[in-house]
Amino acid sequence: MEISTAVFYLVAIITVGSAAMVAFSRNIIYSAFSLLGAFGGVAGIYVFLGADFVAAVQLLIYVGGILVLVLFAVMLTHRITDVQITNRAAGRLTALIVTGVLLYLLVETVRGTSWAKAKELVHQATTGTIGDLFLESYLLPFELASLVLLAALIGAVVISRKEIKE
Amino acid sequence: MFSPNDLSSYLIIGAILFSLGLFTVLTRRNAISVLMGVELILNSANINYVAFSHFSSGSTDGQIYAIFVIMLAAAEAAVGLAIVLAIFQIFHTIDVEAAETLKE
């Protein structure tokens, strides 16, 4: 087995295993920290797909931003000494059957389709191309994105501030 | 069959991540856990975007979409967690079944 294949298996196992921990763990702290492995593994998969910039963005925003935000929310909202099972789950059997059938159908479809073979892999830096695309053909969505982020920023502050009652 | 040079292996990883995220969203009663499931689903969609763009045309359009999805996920996480904190201040719990009314 080639070394890259072995690393690919490792990354895939880390991703799927951490995602399974997120889905099945009884403690929400464990779930939140397993999210780190899932996001990091997905960044590794991006590297295998030759998307270096997306991998860096994934690490910066997901691991550096969203994960920290989730951890903050967990720490702020749950009394750590209070409850044993902080991550209550309900209707597990039904959900397991539904998602299991869905996963089976998806995997069967993927395996039954003859996908086009990859062209010869040219791993080159994509940052310049992405920057050009952002400022040429994707300029309007790019500017709209900044507007959305501003709205989300203000909205988050407005929603989470303490209401001062008269 | 399962190799880094094969599109279907990435699609299968994406499908597994999607199913786990959907399972999380369906079963969890903790609002933050539900948000974690949504993040997993978004990540699986991103894997599909980047994989298809890498294996079909080789262009970077799929990566652009993935970056937009990541940006929207950041905005969604900020607003969603702010709502969770507001719910916690009002109801003193973030169980989604306890907070089914829109007011106190």
Image (cartoon, rainbow, N blue to C red):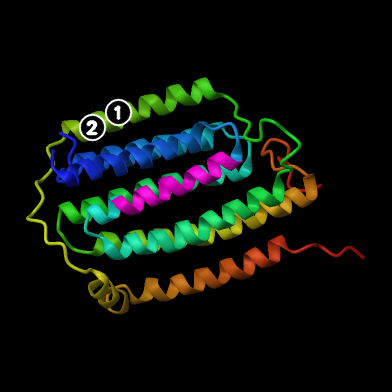
- Percent x, y of residue A13: 33, 37
Which residue is at a point 49% across and 35% down the rendered structure image? Answer: A23
Q: Give the secondary structure at mark 1.
A: helix
Q: Amino acid at mark 2?
A: Thr
Q: Which residues are magenta?
A: A29-44
Find the residue positioned furthest to the left. Answer: A120
What chain letter is assigned to the residue under label 2? A
- Percent x, y of residue B3: 17, 40
Which residue is at a point 49% across and 61% down the rendered structure image? Answer: A64
User: Left of B73 or right of it: where is B3?
Assistant: left
Q: Amino acid at mark 1?
A: Leu
Quadrant for the N terminus of chain A in the image: top left
Which residue is at a point 29% across and 48% down the rendered structure image? Answer: B48
Residue B43 part of the magenta-drawn span: no
Residue A38 part of the magenta-drawn span: yes
Quadrant for the C terminus of chain A in the image: bottom right
Q: Main secondary structure of the magenta part?
A: helix
On residue A109, the disc is 2
User: Left of A97 or right of it: where is A113?
Assistant: left
- Percent x, y of residue A107: 27, 31
Which residue is at a point 17% across and 31% down the rendered structure image? Answer: A112
Indicate the quadrant where residue A14 lies.
top left
Determine the CA span between mark 2 and mark 1. Answer: 6 Å
Depth order, front residue of A122/A7: A7
What chain letter is assigned to the residue under label 1? A
